[in-house]
Image (spheres, rainbow, N blue to C red):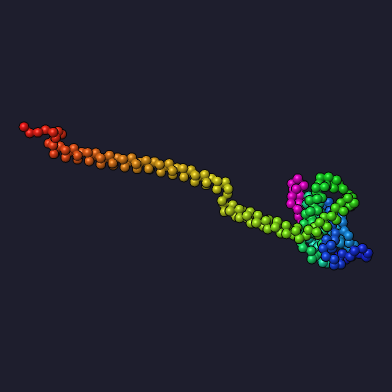
Amino acid sequence: MVSPAPGGKDAGEGGGKAEWLIYAFVARGTAVLAEYTEFTGNFPSIAAQCLQRLPAGSPSASTGPDGRGGAPVRFSYACDGHTFNFLLHRGYAYCVVAKESVPKNVSVAFLERLKDDFMKRYGGGKADTALAKSLNKEYGPVIKKHIQYVLDHSEELDKMLKVQAQVSEVKNIMLDNIEKTLGRGEKLSELHDKTSDLHSQAQEFKKQGVKIRRKTWLQNMKIKLVILGILLLLVIVVWVSVCQGFDCTKHET
């Protein structure tokens, strides 16, 4: 059970936002490098036990092929009215212990903020070889500042994370739709080939249309010339019949 130790501020007392986040630390693997709390209790030891019992390989599960990249991995455990929230990234573990009633986004926002700041300060530096608790003096106060910032801006951070979650959901839906389209065999390369084929067919159809129109025009001209020739022939026949020859100016003597 999570319980306060004699003396100091009781982590179980009510006190509004000031007591939402009661303990936080940064660890490399299972060695805690820096921690901060204003409360007394057994939550540091329970958090350390949770860190030791994280799923096998989880600290390295968030690393990429080069051992550094990859997406963060999150774990959360509930115990006696508190949540023990972990974020694992690049071989480091970030933890915050919060009251169970605290909105989840508050803990998420704190861990993301702590991770980004710690990596900016120590990524690829002395934290990679630092001993347990060796960064406590210089980074413990920084953890305190991050806790205070998140508590002071909890509503804004909660709204921002909700918007990010909605954007992520829309993105996932779009990717799912693309995968379904590709699954039906409509690969982008095939679509491009089909488009090219349709364009070629359209060009060929256009050429055929021009040829047909030209052929039709020639046939119409031939018909018109034949008709004109017949009319001229009729005119000549009538002329010869009336004039009894080609010269209608002759007179009888």
Residue 9 x %, y %: 90, 63
Residue 42 x %, y %: 88, 62
Location of residue 251 with respect to 73 vertically, above or below? above
Image quadrant assignment for residue 45: bottom right
Return the residue found at the far right: 7
In the visual, does 64 lie left or right of 186? Answer: right
In the image, 38 versus 63, the foreground residue is: 38
In magenta stretch: residue 22: no
Q: Residue at x 76, y 60 (%)?
A: 155
Q: Is residue 172 visible?
A: no
In the image, 45 versus 26, the foreground residue is: 26
Task: Name the chief secondary structure element in magenta.
Answer: loop
Residue 233 x %, y %: 20, 38
Image quadrant assignment for residue 246: top left
Location of residue 198 with respect to 158 vertically, above or below? above
In the visual, does 20 lie left or right of 166? Answer: right
Highlighted range, magenta? 60-75
Q: Residue at x 83, y 57 (%)?
A: 148
Figure quadrant of the N terminus = bottom right
Q: Is residue 71 visible?
A: yes
Q: Residue at x 85, y 56 (%)?
A: 144
The tally of labels here is 0
Figure quadrant of the C terminus = top left
Residue 247 x %, y %: 14, 33
Q: Residue at x 88, y 50 (%)?
A: 138
